[in-house]
């Protein structure tokens, strides 16, 4: 299970053992609550890859992570700015309108 916290971190959690396997700090999300995590699972060479798209509150950045089923590590693949037209993409509250 992949969960987010209110400080901009995501955690890979093993629910059956009640154990946090990995924690990833996202510098662009520092201090912002993770509001949505969308996942997709793909079978690849005898294992499964789990892709997760993560967004934080008041941030135009969407980060994409991947987890290999047997690896138990979160890897950051890509970050995309979904609002490139704003003057201050890091501080949305400073933009007019």
Image: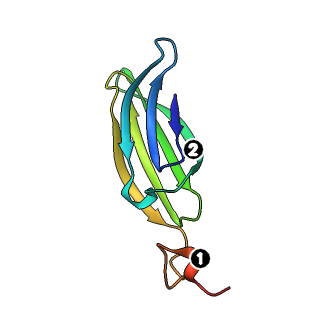
> Which element carries disc 2, helix, strand or loop?
strand
> Which element carries disc 1, helix, strand or loop?
helix
Query: Which residue in the structure is indicated by mark 2?
Result: 37
> x, y percentage for residue 34?
55, 49
Residue at the (37%, 36%) spot, across then down: 23
Q: Residue furthest top?
A: 17
> Badges 1 and 2: C-beta atoms under 8 Å apart?
no
Q: Is residue 45 left or right of residue 13?
A: left
Quadrant location of the C terminus in the rendered image: bottom right
Nearer the camera: disc 1 or disc 2: 1
Q: How packed is label 2: few (under 14 Cα within 10 Å), some, or many (20 or more)?
A: some
| Quarter of the view holding residue 57 | bottom right
Residue at the (46%, 12%) spot, across then down: 17
> x, y percentage for residue 80?
45, 63
User: Is residue 33 shown above or below 96?
Assistant: above
Q: How packed is label 1: few (under 14 Cα within 10 Å), some, or many (20 or more)?
A: few
Query: Which residue in the structure is indicated by mark 1?
Result: 93
Q: How is the image coloured?
A: rainbow
- CA gap, disc 1 and disc 2: 23 Å
Residue 21: image tag = none
Q: Is residue 46 left or right of residue 2?
A: left
Q: Who comes first in sequence, dot 1 or dot 2?
A: 2
User: Is residue 89 shown above or below 15?
Assistant: below
Number of marks in the rendered image: 2
| Quarter of the view holding residue 82 | bottom right
User: Is residue 39 shown above or below 79?
Assistant: above
Looking at the picture, tell me which residue is in the foreground, 49 or 61. Answer: 61
> x, y percentage for residue 86?
54, 82
Residue at the (35%, 47%) spot, across then down: 76
> x, y percentage for residue 6?
54, 47
């Amino acid at each position: 299970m992949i969960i987010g916290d209110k400080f901009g971190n995501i955690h890979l959690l093993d629910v059956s053992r009640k154990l946090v396997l990995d924690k990833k700090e996202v510098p662009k999300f520092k201090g912002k609550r993770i509001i949505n995590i969308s996942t997709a699972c793909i079978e690849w060479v005898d294992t499964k890859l789990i892709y997760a798209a993560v967004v934080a509150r008041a941030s135009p950045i969407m980060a994409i992570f991947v987890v290999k089923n047997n690896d138990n590590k979160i890897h950051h693949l890509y970050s995309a700015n979904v609002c490139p037209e704003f003057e201050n993409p890091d501080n949305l509250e400073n933009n007019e309108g």
